[in-house]
Structures are given as C-alpha cells and as structure tokens.
C-alpha cells in the first residue's frame, strides 16, 4: 500500500519549529515514579529513530512522515547497516546529501509495509447469507456491500521473513491474519480492533474476527498487556482495553465455548495490568470509603519512536531534564488513551506542554474496565468457573460504586473526569473533592452509558439522555468529541466512530423509547455523512467533521487517513442494529 504524502498541519502557533538536532540526553537515573530506568525498546528501533532524524534534516519537513522510517526493515545485519549510516558524509547540521541518503535507504532497507502482506480472508464472500436483513433501501444496500468488500483491502498477514528474523523488523511476528486501519497505520491496533470486529460480525466473518483476538492474546502472553499496536516501538503503552468486549461479542454470536475458555487467562492477566502498580489509584470518599480506579500511564519517558522528531520539537522549549521526561511520559500516556490529542488532557488549552494525562482519572477507561469485569464474570460463568465469576462480579460492583462516587455529577447528569491533586507518585490515596471534577463537556462524559449496569437504570438513562441533548455535542453529522476547537484531532468539530457507537448503543439498549430515538438519530446522521463522503472521495475516512454532512475531519499531527477499519466496522454495525427502510433518504 503506498504511503500517503504526509505533512504536518499543526494549527497552533506555539508549535514553532526549532532547529535543535542534538539528541536529547535522557537522565535514566531520574525516571520518575515507576519502573526504574526506561530501556530502549529494541536496538533496531533506537537506530531507526536516528535514521528518522537524518531523514528530516536531509529531506526537509514537507511531506515528512516520521513513522515511515521506524517501519523500515533491515536487509542485512544491524551492525553493517549502522556502519554504512555512520559513514554518510554530513554537513554541520547533520544532514546528508539527498542522493547519498536515498541510496543508503534503498541499499539497506526494505520499504515500509514490505513485511505486512495482503492476505485474502478465507471467510470472505461477496454477499454473506443473511447480510444486514433490515437494510431495504437498494442504494444503501449496494454501498454496504462495497464497505463489506473493503475487508479484502485491509486484510494482512505478517510476511514469513518476520518470523525467521524478527530482529530485522519492527513489525511483531503475529501468528494470524489481521485487519489494519489503513494508510500509514499498516499494523494491527488495539482499540480499533473492537469496531473492526463488530463490522466483521455483521459481515459474518467469524474466523477473521477470532484471528484478530488470537493476535492480541499473543501480545498479552508476550508482554503482559495488549500493546497500542503490533510494533516493537509500541511496547511501552497500551490502549483503551476492549479485548474482553471483543471476546464477549464473538462468543455471543458464535457460542464458541472453547474460544472463550482460551481467552480467559489472558483477560485476567490484562485486568491485573490495569489494576496494579502505576495504573491504580485509590480515592477516599466523604464517608472514608476507599474506591480503587485506574488511569493511563505509559511506561516511557522519551519521545515516541514513531514521532520522535516531532516530540523533540514539541519539547524543545522545556529545558529542565526531569520536566522534559515528564512531558514525554504525558505524550506517550495520551497516545495510550486513544484520544491523541485533545484539550481533555491539557491543563492549559492553548499550551500543549501542559499535557497532564497521568494526573487524570478518566471516565471512559474506568467504564471499559467495569465492562471488562462484567465480561470476565460472564465468560467465567459460561465456561463453568464459578469462583472467578463471583470474584469479578464483586469487582464490577465495587467499580460501579466507585464510578458513581468519583465521576458522577448529579447536577449535570454526566460523568466527569477527575483531576488528581498530586501529580507525583503518591497518588495511592487521595481524598475526593467535588472541585476536582473536570467541568468541561467531552463526549467521554457519556461513555458509561455503554455499560449495562448504567444503561439498565431508567432514571439515570433519562437524566443522561436529557443532558446529552442539551450538551451541545449533538451536531448535524454526529456527536462532536468536545466543544473546544483547538486544532487537535480529538476535539471539536471532529467526530469519531467509537464515540458515536458507544453512546448510541447504550441509548438503544436502555429500553427507553425516547433514548432509542436519540440513538437512531445519531446513527442516521453518521451513516449519511459516511455515505456522502464515500461517494465524493471514493474512500472511507478515519474521522469526520460533524458540522458538515459529507466532510471528513482534520487537525492533529498527521494528514487525514483513509481505509478505514473502525469507520467501516461501525457503518456495518449501525446498519445491522438500526437497518435502513426502503423509503428513507440517504442524501443529506
Ligand atoms: C518497555 O517495554 C519493553 C518491552 O516490553 C520492556 O522490556 C521495557 O522494560 C519497558 N520499559 C519500561 C520503562 O517499562
Ligand atoms: C542542513 O544543511 C544543508 C547543507 O548545508 C542544507 O541544505 C539544509 O537545508 C539544512 N537543513 C536544515 C533542516 O536546516
Ligand atoms: C481507606 O484507606 C485508608 C488508608 O489506607 C485507611 O486508613 C482507611 O481505614 C480505609 N477505609 C476503609 C473504610 O477501609
Ligand atoms: C527541574 O524541575 C523539577 C520539577 O519541577 C525541580 O524539582 C528541579 O529542581 C528542576 N531542576 C532544575 C535543575 O532546575
Ligand atoms: C496558557 O498558555 C498560553 C500560551 O502559552 C499563555 O499565553 C497563557 O498565559 C496560559 N494561561 C495560563 C492561565 O497560564
Ligand atoms: C456538578 O456540577 C455543578 C454544575 O456544573 C457544580 O456546581 C458542582 O460543583 C458539581 N459537583 C457535584 C458533586 O455536583
Ligand atoms: C480495494 O481493492 C480493490 C482491488 O484491488 C481496488 O480496485 C479498490 O480500488 C480498493 N478500494 C479502495 C477504497 O482502496
């Protein structure tokens, strides 16, 4: 797949470009809080970051995608490649001649994407039996079949060479086929996979759905948690934990007990990851009860390798070494949230260096972990493990109470992120204070509604639905991510598939007629904008502009991407849930 030419469209003026090319020396003895010194991921990743830096100085900033360089794979030994790299003649600023550099890349590397190969999914058929029975409108049906056919375009496997010589690749040697999001995202991603799987289930591609889960379980077995994505440079952070939700959806469709049984140990291991060490925070309420909750916290205090040149530039105005390390940790932790980047994580909405993700208890993360506990309880029960079923049911009841106590704001009818008062390591115990709830409106303030223990409470559903309707988030073409137009990707006016889906599905499943109408309205707007943009551009997009039907979204640190895994998945999942009557217009 060709890499799109990429240029940075950082909107805000504070992202000034400084020509500081010296490598930042990280003081490893001062790594804060957790796991001791930060180790490089693999020698190859560290080396490719140097190649990335040289590429930037040599080729210049326009059309530069830093990720392209950490996706290269070696043709021969690392040491001989390093020798050739160090022998390149350089100018004072570290640049090589364009000709020398291009020759070096051609001689020593296979191109990005070379080690991920197209692989036709065996369970794909052009029109699956029983496909979207409630989609009656012929135009919508024809389009749904086109979206369904895109699974073929996005299906990949790891090339044989990666299994033979993993040290030549940053791609991890996953055992099974997978679906990629698309464009520059040429590997499997964690939370994206949930919506990919929901779409695959609508497409009746159960084997492909299961093989994605098998790959993610492989990562838990190797690393103890699911990585952000299947690359050696993503080894120090995870992403919103939805593996249990994937397993449980697949089980509900297929009744495959063996599959559920195999997944459970990995799910329990992942639960431990999110509920121990640096991820766990205890909040004491006004009655002196203790509530255990979780936060995002990347095990990393250096630039993200896939955006190393960019992160260094962003950090260049921070001179104090330990503050710089903390900033890098916040950047990586924000990538872990899946919402990279957003004013949600910034203390000062116009200063990117005030990212403070590790000082926030996020509503959505804890809703996901509540879901995880309920899923593990359910899957344990169906596989006959009563002890674990009871254990995790208890854990889910405790978290339900914690979410209500710490995040719920009765006046607003929303769950609000909670600011931790001490950003250092001593977050173990903090006392709850109302003033620490983040009063800003984000779509995440409504995510707990996705979880049954909240959507099954009628008075809560009524309150939250009203609150959503008056929040300002419901726009012409879907739910906005926030109300702040910051130029960041996860802010106004961008809308993302996961957000539309979780909120609409919660509303639809609540049993309230009123809420179901709101859900359907969201789904109809979303499907129309996806349809119109597809007809206009021929592709599905990563994100959409919810102000204008048929427009895709922008902003952030890379150019808009297409393909696109979770958008395709959601179109199919929405059409499965809500159908599309013969006489409903698809145009907007
Ligand atoms: C980063 O991840 C790698 C691979 O799992 C691990 O060896 C290393 O210890 C991690 N670094 C930190 C600081 O946890
Ligand atoms: C680095 O130096 C070279 C040669 O002196 C010059 O052509 C190039 O523009 C410089 N690069 C940057 C990013 O300043
Ligand atoms: C909560 O934790 C604190 C600190 O460990 C402890 O003093 C207190 O007794 C605990 N409260 C309850 C109700 O267990
Ligand atoms: C760097 O910042 C930390 C945390 O704010 C502070 O404790 C330390 O004294 C600073 N170091 C220097 C050299 O200014
Ligand atoms: C927020 O950041 C901007 C840009 O750096 C700065 O001008 C402003 O003073 C900051 N606001 C506060 C309250 O610190
Ligand atoms: C909830 O929100 C209201 C209005 O925004 C605010 O005044 C109040 O302090 C918040 N906290 C609680 C616990 O209600
Ligand atoms: C999907 O693949 C087919 C066959 O290679 C190609 O014709 C089509 O243009 C691709 N679609 C998209 C949206 O990339």
Image (cartoon, grey):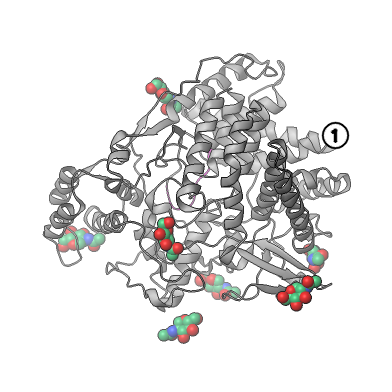
Q: Position of residue 445 (x, y in %)?
A: 71, 54
Q: Residues within 10 Å of mark 1 (few under 14, many from 20)?
A: few
Image mark count: 1
**In front: 419, or 17?**
419
Q: Is mark 1 within 8 Å of ligand 6?
A: no
Q: Quadrant of residue 6?
A: top left
Q: Position of residue 323 (x, y in %)?
A: 46, 75
Residue located beneath label 1 in the image? 513
**In front: 170, or 105?**
170
Label 1 element class: helix
Describe residue 317's horizontal placement relative to residue 200 as left or right: left
Residue 552 forms part of the magenta stretch: yes
**In front: 386, or 461?**
386
Please tell me which residue is depicted at 70% across the width and 74% down the height of the picture: 430
Q: Which residues are magenta?
A: 551-558
Please tell me which residue is depicted at 16% across the width and 67% down the height of the picture: 92
Report whether residue 528 is seen: no
Which quadrant of the figure contains the C terminus? top right
Residue 548 forms part of the magenta stretch: no
Please tell me which residue is depicted at 53% across the width and 41% down the height of the picture: 192
Q: Position of residue 196 (x, y in %)?
A: 55, 34
Q: Quadrant of residue 284?
A: bottom right
């Amino acid at each position: 797949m060709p890499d799109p030419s990429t240029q940075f469209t950082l909107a805000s003026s504070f992202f000034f470009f400084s020509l500081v090319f010296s490598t930042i020396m990280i003081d490893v003895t001062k790594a804060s809080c957790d796991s001791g010194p930060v180790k490089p991921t693999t020698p190859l990743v560290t080396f490719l970051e140097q190649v990335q830096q040289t590429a930037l100085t040599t080729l210049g900033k326009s059309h530069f995608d830093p990720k392209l360089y950490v996706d290269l794979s070696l043709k021969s030994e690392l040491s001989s490649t390093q020798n050739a790299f160090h022998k390149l003649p350089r100018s004072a600023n570290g640049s090589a001649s364009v000709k020398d550099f291009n020759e070096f890349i051609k001689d020593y590397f296979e191109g990005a994407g070379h080690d991920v190969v197209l692989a036709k999914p065996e369970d794909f058929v052009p029109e699956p039996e029983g496909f979207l029975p409630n989609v009656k409108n012929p135009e919508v049906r024809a389009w749904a079949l086109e979206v369904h056919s895109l699974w073929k375009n996005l299906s990949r496997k790891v090339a044989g060479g990666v299994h033979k010589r993993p040290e030549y690749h940053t791609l991890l040697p996953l055992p099974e086929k997978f679906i990629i999001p698309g464009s520059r995202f040429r590997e499997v991603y964690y939370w994206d996979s949930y919506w990919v799987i929901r779409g695959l289930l609508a497409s009746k591609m159960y084997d492909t759905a299961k093989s994605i889960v098998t790959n993610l379980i492989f990562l838990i077995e190797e690393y103890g948690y699911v990585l952000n994505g299947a690359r050696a440079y993503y080894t120090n952070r995870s992403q919103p934990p939805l593996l249990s939700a994937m397993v449980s959806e697949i089980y509900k469709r297929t009744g495959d007990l063996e599959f559920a049984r195999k997944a459970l140990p990995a799910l329990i291991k992942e639960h431990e990851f999110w509920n121990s060490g640096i991820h766990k925070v205890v909040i004491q309420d006004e009655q002196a009860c203790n509530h255990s909750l979780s936060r995002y916290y990347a095990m990393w205090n250096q630039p993200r390798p896939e955006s190393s040149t960019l992160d260094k530039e962003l950090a260049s105005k921070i001179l104090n070494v330990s503050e710089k390390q903390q900033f890098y940790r916040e950047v990586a932790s924000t990538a872990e949230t899946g919402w990279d980047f957003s004013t949600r994580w910034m203390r000062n909405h116009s200063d990117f260096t005030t990212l403070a993700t590790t000082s926030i208890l996020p509503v959505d993360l804890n809703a996901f972990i509540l879901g995880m506990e309920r899923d593990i309880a359910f899957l344990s029960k169906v596989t006959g493990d009563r002890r674990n079923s009871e254990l995790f049911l208890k854990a889910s009841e405790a978290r339900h109470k914690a979410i209500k106590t710490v995040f719920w704001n009765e006046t607003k009818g929303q769950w609000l992120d909670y600011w931790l008062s001490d950003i250092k390591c001593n977050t173990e115990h903090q006392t709850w204070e109302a003033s620490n709830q983040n009063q800003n409106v984000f779509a995440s303030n409504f995510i707990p509604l996705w979880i049954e223990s909240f959507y099954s409470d009628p008075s809560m559903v009524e309150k939250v639905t009203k609150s959503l309707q008056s929040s300002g988030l419901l726009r012409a073409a879907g739910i906005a991510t926030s109300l702040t137009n910051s130029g960041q990707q996860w802010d106004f006016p961008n809308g993302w598939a996961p957000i539309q889906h979780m909120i609409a599905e919660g509303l639809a499943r609540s049993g309230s007629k009123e809420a179901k109408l709101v859900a359907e309205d969201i789904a109809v707007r979303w499907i129309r904008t996806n349809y119109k943009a597809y007809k206009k551009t021929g592709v599905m997009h990563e994100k959409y502009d919810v102000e204008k039907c048929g427009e895709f979204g922008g902003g952030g640190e890379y150019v808009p991407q297409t393909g696109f895994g979770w958008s395709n998945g959601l179109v199919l999942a929405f059409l499965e849930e809500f159908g599309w009557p013969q006489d409903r217009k698809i145009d907007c």
